Amino acid sequence: MAIGQAQQQVDDWISKHGVRYFNELTNMAQLTEEVGEVARIIARRYGEQSEKPSDRDKDLGEELADVLFVVLCLANQTGVDLEGAFQKKMEIKSQRDHDRHHNNPKLK
């Protein structure tokens, strides 16, 4: 699915099920909360913190999808073409970072 299609799917869902978008500040707070849930899973499952029994059933993919959903909401309600913005960012990163990463001895 293209990013533009995902933005449209979220907009359709909001219209059908969500009544309206939460305001931008609420969505920013919700994004922070969802990123925190991803961080908790990563820290406990892949980092040095021990995983609590209540964390073992957490689905990283589901939590990442929650982050993506809120990002798509924010893009929609602020008029951002996220697909275009992402393509532009990939071009910038490809030109700016290619030599830097290839020449980084820490990545060897």
Image (cartoon, helix red, strand yellow):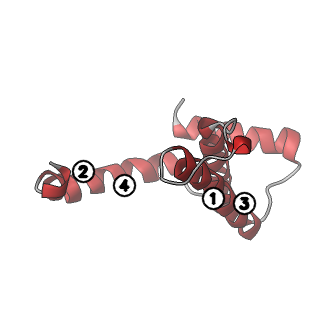
**Relative side of 88 to 37, left or right:** left
Label 2 crowd (10 A; few <14 / some 14-19 / many >=20): few
Label 1 crowd (10 A; few <14 / some 14-19 / many >=20): some
Residue 32 lies, in percent from the top left, at: 65, 63
Q: What type is the residue that disc 4 sits on?
A: Lys
Element class at badge 2:
helix
Residue at the limit of the structure toward the top, as seen here: 1
Q: Earlier in the sequence, mark 3 or mark 4?
A: 3
Q: Quadrant of the N terminus?
A: top right
Callouts 2 and 4 close, C-beta under 8 Å: no
Q: Residue at x 85, y 46 (%)?
A: 18
Location of mark 1 (residue): 36
Label 3 crowd (10 A; few <14 / some 14-19 / many >=20): some
**Relative side of 85 to 8, left or right:** left
Q: CA distance from mark 4 to mark 1?
A: 24 Å
Dot in front, 2 or 3: 3
Location of mark 2 (residue): 94
Q: Earlier in the sequence, mark 4 or mark 1?
A: 1
Q: CA distance from mark 3 to mark 4?
A: 24 Å
Dot in front, 1 or 2: 1
Dot in front, 3 or 1: 1
Q: Earlier in the sequence, mark 1 or mark 2?
A: 1
Location of mark 3 (residue): 30
Q: What type is the residue that disc 1 sits on?
A: Gly
Label 4 crowd (10 A; few <14 / some 14-19 / many >=20): few
In the rendered view, would you say 75 is above or below 18? below
